[in-house]
Structures are given as C-alpha cells and as structure tokens.
Amino acid sequence: MDKQQIKLVLEALIFASDTPITLKQLNSILAEITIDAIEEALRELKNDYEPRALMLKKVAGGYQFTTKSDYAEWVSQMFEEKARSRLSRAALETLAIIAFKQPISRVEVSAIRGVGSEGVIKKLLDARLITISGRDSGPGRALLFKTTPEFLHYFGINDISDLPRPKEVEELLAEGEGGALLQELPDEVLLTEQGAKAAEQAAAENQQNPAAPENPAADTESRDSAATSAEENAGETKEAADNATQ
C-alpha cells in the first residue's frame, strides 16, 4: 500500500468513526502498516486540510474531523436545539469542580458548591462525563469521582491538562462572548490552584518566621501606661490654661 492510499484509508476511517479513533485502533486495522508510517500519513492528511473548512484534530487521545471555528456561526444554526439543551449551571459547576479537583468525593463537591450535589452527579454519571475512580481512604470510604474520555470529547480537548489554568481563565473572563460561559464557573474552582499556592507559601513563611507568642498582660500594661500618660498630659494642659487666665 503506497503513502497516498494509506492517507485515503485513514481519512475514511476517521470520517466513519463516531468517536475519536486512536492511533492504536488505526494500527490494529492497518496491521501491515507501521505506527511511524501512520503518524506520518496523519501529519500529511492534516496539512492537506489546512485550506479547507474541516480540520483533523486530536481529541480525547484520538483523531477526529471537525469544522473550523471560522464557520461556527453557520454550523451552530443547525444545532440550535442541541445548544438549548446544553449542561445546566449546576452541572457545569459540579463538572468544573470534579475536573480541577479529581479524584473528589460527593461530600467535597457539595461543600465547595454550598448545596447538595447528589442529583447533579447522578446526571453526569448517566451522561458518562464522569465515572467512579475508587474510594477514599478516610472514614466511610466515600466514592471518588473523576472525568472520562467522553468529558474530553464533549469539550473538544485532548487531555485534562489542556483545561485553562486559573490565571488563563481570569484573562478569558475579561474578554467577550467566549468568557461569558466561563463566568458560570464557581469562584472556588477558578481560585483553587492560586489558593493552594498561597496557603503553601504562608505556611512556609510561618515556619521560617514564627510569630511571637501573645502576651495579654504586657498588652494590658502598655495600654494602662498610655492611658496614664494621656491623663497626665491633659492635667498639665488644664493647669497651664488656668495660670494663663489668672
């Protein structure tokens, strides 16, 4: 099979797959072709699509054809109904917390949100956006949750590390429509990493420069001394005023 035919077969496989198809899956189908040859063909195929409305993108560890953002205005008109049924605010909050703090228990999620999250977590499980990753080692051994490959696919990213960091989110929030969706994320999620770093720095500083122990007796003595001094000054001022009058 020559290089051009490999590209055509790959194009057909990626187009026909309803989910991102991985390099391992492609190699299992094209068993006689080396992984290096497949990767080279994928790079060339990606370049071939540069001047077109479609693009070859790596999503959730696999390859998928997607439309370029330049044509989102027209494509979105076909999916208005789907857009109206997008995730609720509560689901976005819960999903964001799990994504940034995973693995995390339902109790921890509820504590961050300030409301119960059992129903929302069940819906996210049903949607296969999150899954159970194990149990906590603490009392009660609570179930822990993490995101899934479907989560990556839903948001069009290849790896969880592609999520914006808190500082990047703040910059996006200052921009137009793109930042409007991110404003739905709770402050606790956006500041998680910054708060953790600040706490670590404060703990390190406290260890290096321990605060002086409090001495209530000394504070009281200092206040009494200041009050006595003020009274004496006031008395001297009054006496001087009386002498001036006489």
Image (cartoon, rainbow, N blue to C red):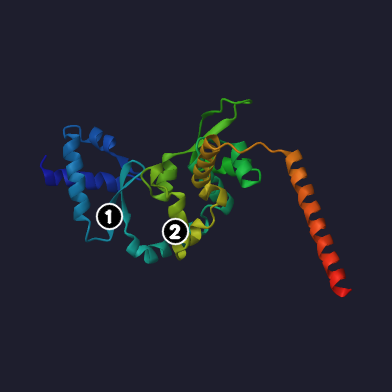
Q: Residue at x 21, y 45 (%)?
A: 42
For marks 1 and 2 on the same chain, the one whose residue lies earlier in the sequence: 1
Between residue 56 and residue 228, name the one nearer to us. Answer: 228
In this orientation, which residue lies closer to the viewer: 150 or 17? 150
Please tell me whether mark 1 or mark 2 is closer to you in this view: 2
State the quadrant of the C terminus.
Answer: bottom right
Q: Residue at x 42, y 50 (%)?
A: 164
- Is residue 97 placed above or below 239 in the rendered structure? above
User: Which picture quadrant has residue 37?
Assistant: top left
The residue that mark 2 highlights is 171
Where does label 1 land, which residue? 55
Q: CA distance from mark 1 to mark 2?
A: 27 Å
- Residue at 43 percent of width and 42 percent of height: 150
The residue sitting at the bottom extreme is 245
- Return the x and y of residue 59 as percentages of the image width and height: 34, 46
Q: Is residue 71 visible?
A: yes
- Local packing at callout 1 (Cα closer than 10 Å; few below 14, some 14-19, many 20+) is some
Q: Residue at x 49, y 56 (%)?
A: 182
Instruction: Identify the image quadrant of residue 234.
Output: bottom right
Mark 1: amino acid: Met
The answer to whether the residues at label 1 and label 2 have Cβ atoms under 8 Å apart is no
In the displayed structure image, the side of residue 228 where residue 113 appears, left or right: left
In the image, residue 91 above or below residue 142: below
On the image, the x and y values in percent for residue 62 come to: 32, 42
Q: Residue furthest right?
A: 246
Give the position of the N terminus as an image quadrant.
top left
How far across and down, in percent of the image, does residue 120 sit? 59, 44
Query: Where residue 117 sits: x, y (%)?
Result: 62, 43
Please state which amino acid type lies under the numbered disc 2. Answer: Glu
Quadrant hosting residue 137:
top right
